Image (cartoon, coloured by chain):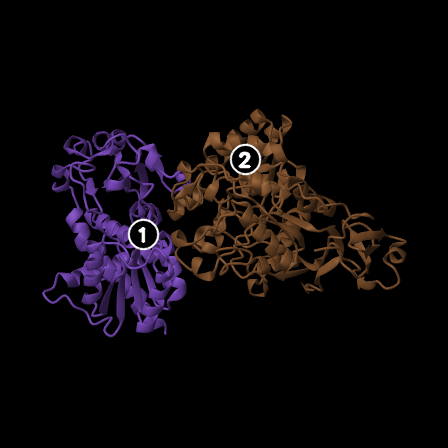
Chain colours: A purple, B brown
Amino acid sequence: MNRHLISAADLSREDALRVLDTADELARISDRPIKKLPTLRGRTVVNLFFEDSTRTRISFEAAAKRLSADVINFSAKGSSVAKGESLKDTALTLEAMGADAVVIRHNASGAPHRLAEWVHGSVINAGDGAHEHPTQALLDAFTIRRRFGRSSGSGAGQGGALDGLRVTIVGDILHSRVARSNVLLLHTLGAEVLLIAPPTLLPVAVDTWPCSIDYDLDAALPKSDVVMMLRVQQERMNAAYFPSVREYSRRYGLDSDRMAQLPERAIVMHPGPMNRGVEIAAGVADSPRSTVVEQVANGVSVRMAVLYLLLGGAEEGQ
Amino acid sequence: MSAGGAAWLIRGARPLGGGPADIGVRDGLVAGLGTGAAAEAGPGAQVLDAAGLIALPGLIDLHTHLREPGREDAETVETGTMAAALGGFTAVHAMANTEPVADTAGVVEQIWRLGRHAGHCAVVPVGAVTSGLAGKQLAELGAMADSAARVRVFSDDGRCVSDAVLMRRALEYVKAFDGVIAQHAQEPRLTEGAQMNEGEVSGRLGLAGWPAVAEEAVIARDCLLAAHVGSALHLCHVSTAGSVEIIRWAKSKGWQVTAEVTPHHLLLTDELVAGYDPVYKVNPPLRTAADVAALRAALADGTIDCVATDHAPHPLEDKETEWAAAAFGMTGLETALRVVQEAMVETGLLDWAGVADRMSARPAAIGRLPGHGQPLAPGSPASLTLYDPEPREAVDPATHASRSRNSPFAGRVLPGRVVATFLHGRPTVLDGKLA
């Protein structure tokens, strides 16, 4: 694996399966009464968050702590980010403190790339602007693999990939880092990805992505094994991307009637936080098909695996 | 700035890349060319061995940001004109987006005087079209035209004159003193928050896209306006294949439309943004390989009249940031001729006579600059550039005279070296160094 995890494209199929298998292994430890491993004792993981995201931050924090790493939370929101030196100055500060890994969330696409030029430790992208969110894609792949019985069994043995599974991602593709990372990773793992969105919320050259595109959610549902609903951000609602929230919900929201069109085994995913009643109806979010809560739990296991492989692997290498 | 005192005999240079000929320089003028040059220069002339060097008329830049007054941490008239001379330029047009804005006779005269005082090349101020570049009301264009700076080119560069009525009035108004409006074509609503060319790469990188149509729509409108009022329109830093088609059409109608292209848009593409290094962040943005090919072809066939650098220096702290926080712009004066050799000459699209036309004669004509951009002939002002096309070396911004280091060509191997520059008979650069 690379030293950093910045894009899902950094992961080969072999790398991705290794992360997922390791996460399977680590998930079993999370089921024990004592959840802690000594693996990263004495290593320092910094959570560097320039954007509010309590969910992602505590997921990384729990992951690092279960591996016995020292965790420093650095919330840079509200500091003089606009001027820009702060990212470099922050990087130099972290470097001086001896961070072995920096988990960064930033509202500017590419900020983790810049950070990686200024620090020696591993950089893990926890979401950068509209670019990528690779650990979200890994936890989504992990969740799909479990639900479709392709995980590695207890004991040794490699789990399977996602070959042949049909994953439909619905919503604001244009601004979604979750969608970008998922398209890349799910394609790497052999899934067939279909994007459904109003044309205003698709990038102009989306036809160059390794997936197919359509505007019709109803036509897509009967041939989907997985439906992943994306959050509609508040700021899109007043920027002429669609006429009204109600129209969006009617055309691209997943309600119970639409859910009934899914094949029997199909699952419904959402990266959270959900707008209940907008992109997903409450009855769908709380149905047995919904993996929303599992996704959160799986997030910790997958992030443990990423930290373990990036930091533990580096130690062996030296 | 007056005629240089010493006489020079430049031996064995190749005017416009042709056969070797001596060039005699005396009293600020080309005194003789070929046989007889030595006699015209006189027995006291200093001799410069220029065997193998290409002699070009001094280069003229229609689009330079000298940053003074206001951002002397990025560039000053002194350092910017040093960079210009080292790049082979004998005149630069200083863009109006300084602080204060060059929108009054007082500011343009100050910049003009700073240029004369520095003495490395002529500094020709560009006046703002609207007061404070605010796009609300016309600046006092006539006062700037009548000032000692003799402003003829007006531009709100950095901002588009997007109001159609204001643009029409500006085009009409400058007819009274043979002015030209240089438009920065960028439809503001279509480019709110835009970070890079909108296309495959912007979609992949999650950076807000800057559609080609935002440039092309304004160019189309302004060509029609220029035709309607019978005035002269110049289009700054054209960057898309679609813009080229519109300009070709406008010229076919006989309208007074001219256009420039930057060296970086002739060589670099948006793929370079993939690493999020803001040294590649520029307005207009780097486009696709197809756009680069169209721009080269348009410069070769004359649809695009000239090369202009859009030299835009920025201090390190304005570039050493995440992409979205970084400033737009690239330096270009010290690499322009080398890039043009790489993109246009090595590819067979232009010969050296063509380079002289696109980098000297035409920009001087567009800028209404008397005494510049004239052919290398007896009686012409002795403003010329001696250029060695042979060496190939990596660009090292640390060696540049510009105060700023934001060259997108850093580390890139480019051909050529400016050996000497003469301004009205006086060397400003000799042996690649400031004279």
Instruction: Name the chain letter of the residue that bears numbered label 2.
Output: B
Task: Residue A290: give x, y in percent of width and height.
Answer: 16, 43
When asked about the image quadrant of residue B296, the answer is: top right
The disc at residue A107 is 1
In this rendering, is residue B392 above or below B206? below
Give neighbour class at mark 1: few <14, some 14-19, many 20+ (Cα, 10 Å).
some
Task: Residue B102: give x, y in percent of width and height.
Answer: 52, 47
Instruction: Name the chain letter of the residue that bears numbered label 1.
Output: A
Position of B376 with respect to A57 (left or right) is: right
Image quadrant containing the N terminus of chain A: bottom left
When asked about the image quadrant of residue A263, the answer is: top left
Cα gap from disc 2 to disc 1, whole angstroms: 33 Å
Secondary structure under tag 2 reads helix
In the image shown, does B283 or B361 lie closer to the viewer? B361
For label 2, the residue is B243
Specify the amino acid type for callout 1.
Asn
Position of B416 with respect to B292 (left or right) is: right
Q: Are marks 2 and 1 on the same chain?
A: no
Position of B321 with respect to B279 (left or right) is: left
Any part of residue A1 in sight: no
In the image shown, does B164 or B112 lie closer to the viewer? B112
Specify the amino acid type for callout 2.
Ser
The disc at residue B317 is none
In this rendering, is residue B13 above or below A42? above
Give neighbour class at mark 2: few <14, some 14-19, many 20+ (Cα, 10 Å).
many
Task: Residue B28: give x, y in percent of width and height.
Answer: 77, 54
